[in-house]
Image (cartoon, rainbow, N blue to C red):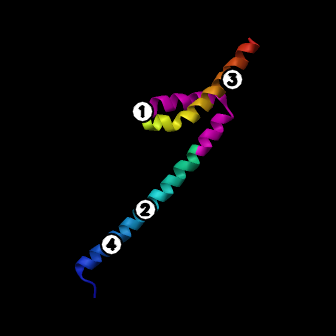
Amino acid sequence: MATLEQKIAQKEDELARLKAQSRKLENGQKIITGGMVLSLARNNPQRAKTLLEDIKSQVIKKTDLERMQPIIDELTAIVDKANEQQNNYL
């Protein structure tokens, strides 16, 4: 028969496994959502502009901004191209 301390340790291990499982699920959801948002922005200059504005207002850590720089550059190019095309039609 397990001691009370052993039972507590077993429950703590079970809780740790459940928390890890929850984090894994959440991280997967974030990856899928991020991919979807990028795909939408790549195909719609207005969404690209909105996403750029969101990045600029929400991503404040220097290391995060550095990591995001290739995406920022890509979205900026999409917005710039759309603006250029619009100006050519005017």
C-alpha span from label 1 to label 2: 27 Å
Q: Is residue 35 above or below residue 17?
A: above
Residue marked by disc 3: 81
Q: Quadrant of residue 18?
A: bottom left
Eye-nearest disc, 1 or 4: 1
Q: Are marks 1 and 2 in contact (CB under 8 Å)?
A: no
Q: Residue at x 74, y 14 (%)?
A: 88
Q: Which residues are magenta?
A: 35-62
Quarter of the image for the N terminus: give it: bottom left
Indicate the position of residue 48 as horizontal and vertical percent values: 61, 31
C-alpha span from label 1 to label 3: 26 Å
Q: Going from the N terminus, do you reach mark 3 or mark 4 first?
A: 4
Q: Describe the element under mark 1 as helix, strand or loop.
A: loop
Q: Going from the N terminus, do you reach mark 1 or mark 4 first?
A: 4
Q: Is residue 89 above or below residue 15?
A: above
Q: Residue at x 64, y 27 (%)?
A: 77
Residue marked by disc 1: 60
Indicate the position of residue 16 as horizontal and vertical percent values: 37, 65
Indicate the position of residue 37 as horizontal and vertical percent values: 60, 40
Mark seen at residue 20? 2
Quarter of the image for the C terminus: give it: top right
